[in-house]
Amino acid sequence: MSRLLAIAALLAALAVACGGDGATPAPGATSPAAAETKPSAEPTATPPAGASEANVEPVSFETKDGLRIDGQLYTTPGPKRKAVILAASFLRPKGWEPLARDLAARGIAALTFTMPRYVDTGESRDLALADDDMETAVRFLQSRDYPLIYLAGEFEAGTVALRVAARLDLAGVVTASARISSTSGSTIVFDARQDVVSVTEPKLFLAGQDSLSPAVVDTLMQLAPQPKQSWVADSPAMGSQIIEIPEARRLIIDFISR
């Protein structure tokens, strides 16, 4: 009898060790194996509008006097409707690149290039050619069949952008830390106060808390016809540094996306 009891006890122990106690799991309970993380079979969410990868095309265009300007054209597949020129200062030649990628992901082509250096920066190129140089970029995008073209520039490029917008039919203009004027020696070549009064397109004036830009924005807002808007950062960000501030980047994207 004692041998039979020992065999029964051994069989019972083996059943417990193998998990064969026959108990029904409580509702909602999971075994250790079931609790392991596994790849979800659920479809992934649709990426946000700004998540698409932009195609970056090296491009070049030639000014009236034969100067070649190189740039980058950011696009994504789809119909051509809006394009924006992001004219950079030589101080921050790649400063507009993050915004260009954001815009392209939303179906808005973006052309980035660095404005040539002129006599005011120690080079020999005549500053009076700056608006023609920028207009060449506009003509380039027109040759690519974009019907709505926006113009954005930082520092002196913003001042020049107002001159170009005053004489061309554009969709809108954005300035970032624009100067009230651009001079060659003692001669004022571009004066934003004179040009902005003729810019009937929508306008967005951006600035940071440096010593000049907020006052320039105030002046431009006083002189410019509607539609117009402005935004001044709480930080000393200048030029394309402003787009590193999420609110400023959102403002630009919303302005161009309307």
Image: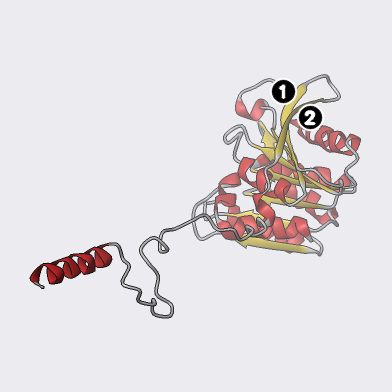
Say which amino acid is labelled 1: Arg
* Residue 249, percent from left and from top: 62, 55
Question: Which secondary structure, mark 2?
Answer: helix
Residue lying at 32% horizontally and 68% vertically, measured from the top left: 20
Q: Quadrant of residue 116?
A: top right
Count all numbered tags in the image, as a single digit.
2
Q: Among all residues in the image, which is located at the extreme left?
A: 2
Quadrant including the C terminus: bottom right
Front-most of residues 143 and 155: 143
For disc 1, the neighbor class at 10 Å (few under 14, some 14 to 19, many from 20) is some
Instruction: Report the side of 112 relative to 166 (left or right).
Output: left
Residue lying at 71% horizontally and 63% vertically, measured from the top left: 229
- For disc 2, the marked residue is 129
- For disc 1, the marked residue is 125
Can the viewer see residue 203? no
Q: Are marks 1 and 2 in contact (CB under 8 Å)?
A: yes
Can the viewer see residue 70? yes
Residue lying at 67% horizontally and 43% vertically, measured from the top left: 53
Residue lying at 15% horizontally and 69% vertically, measured from the top left: 4
Q: Among all residues in the image, which is located at the extreme bottom?
A: 27
Quadrant including the N terminus: bottom left
| Vertical arrangement, residue 57 with respect to residue 124, above or below | below
* Residue 88, percent from left and from top: 66, 37
